[in-house]
Structure formats: structure tokens, C-alpha cells
Image (cartoon, grey):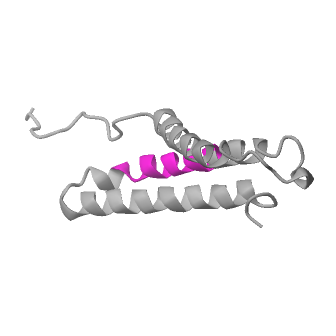
């Protein structure tokens, strides 16, 4: 029998998908909270609980951005320019997910 050299038993993902989702949702919740909580004079036509929708929708979109970051791990571990490209693509994907969640969450209230 011959010994095989150079085999890697390290896991591909440095963190679980749940951890990445929580990180993405946490950042999104902080950002939308900073945007929403200073509003004192809301339009009465929006209803009493108008903040619930954006406070649920934006963190959900942030969690999906965290999943996208997790999925890009395979490219990130290849090193070199692929690592830099993976970070850039992950950041852009998270920003797009956050923007779409913000539009969906604020539609009909602050986003007319």
C-alpha cells in the first residue's frame, strides 16, 4: 500500500449556514432599525403596525444574503484572484438582497 500525501480533511465551510444567516439578518435588522425608529410622525393611512413588515422582511432578505455568502465559500477557498472576486461578488449579492428586501418591506409606506 502506498501512502497518499497532501489530502486535506479540513471542512470547506468555516461556519455553518445558520451562523451566516444570523449574521446577515443581524446586520440587516440593525440597518433598518436605524432607518425606521427615528420616524415619529407616520402617516395614519399606513396603519398602527406599519413597522412590522419592514422589520421582518429586511432581516429575511439579509439572511438570504448570508446564504449567498455561504454558497460562495467554494470559490473563496481557491485563493488568489478568485478569493478577491468571491468577496466582491458576495458583498454585491448581499447589497442586492438587502436592497430588494428594503423595497419589499417599505413598499406602500416610506417607499411610495
> Residue shown at 65%/44% (left/top)?
38
**Percent x, y for residue 49?**
84, 41
For the record, the magenta segment spans 59-73
Report the side of 76 relative to 20 (left or right): left
Relative depth, front residue between 38 and 100: 38
Relative depth, front residue between 53 and 6: 53
> Residue shown at 33%/36% (left/top)?
14
Q: Main secondary structure of the magenta part?
A: helix
**Percent x, y for residue 83?**
26, 57
- The quarter of the rendered structure image containing the N terminus is top left
Q: Is residue 68 magenta?
A: yes
Count of numbered circles on the image: 0
> Residue shown at 25%/34% (left/top)?
10
- The image quarter containing residue 101 is bottom right
Report the side of 3 relative to 56 (left or right): left
**Percent x, y for residue 88?**
35, 62
- The quarter of the rendered structure image containing the C terminus is bottom right
**Percent x, y for residue 45?**
92, 54
Q: Residue at the bottom extreme?
A: 112
> Residue shown at 21%/64% (left/top)?
81
Q: Is residue 53 magenta?
A: no
Relative depth, front residue between 101 and 85: 101
- The image quarter containing residue 12 is top left
Report the side of 38 relative to 98 (left or right): right
Amino acid at each position: 500500500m502506498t501512502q497518499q500525501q497532501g489530502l486535506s480533511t479540513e471542512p470547506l465551510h468555516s461556519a455553518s449556514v445558520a451562523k451566516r444567516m444570523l449574521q446577515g439578518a443581524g446586520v440587516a435588522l440593525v440597518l433598518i432599525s436605524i432607518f425606521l425608529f427615528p420616524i415619529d410622525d407616520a402617516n395614519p393611512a399606513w396603519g398602527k403596525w406599519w413597522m412590522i413588515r419592514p422589520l421582518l422582511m429586511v432581516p429575511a432578505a439579509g439572511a438570504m444574503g448570508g446564504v449567498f455568502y455561504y454558497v460562495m465559500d467554494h470559490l473563496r477557498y481557491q485563493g488568489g484572484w478568485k478569493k478577491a472576486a468571491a468577496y466582491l461578488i458576495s458583498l454585491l449579492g448581499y447589497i442586492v438582497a438587502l436592497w430588494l428586501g428594503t423595497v419589499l418591506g417599505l413598499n406602500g409606506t416610506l417607499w411610495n
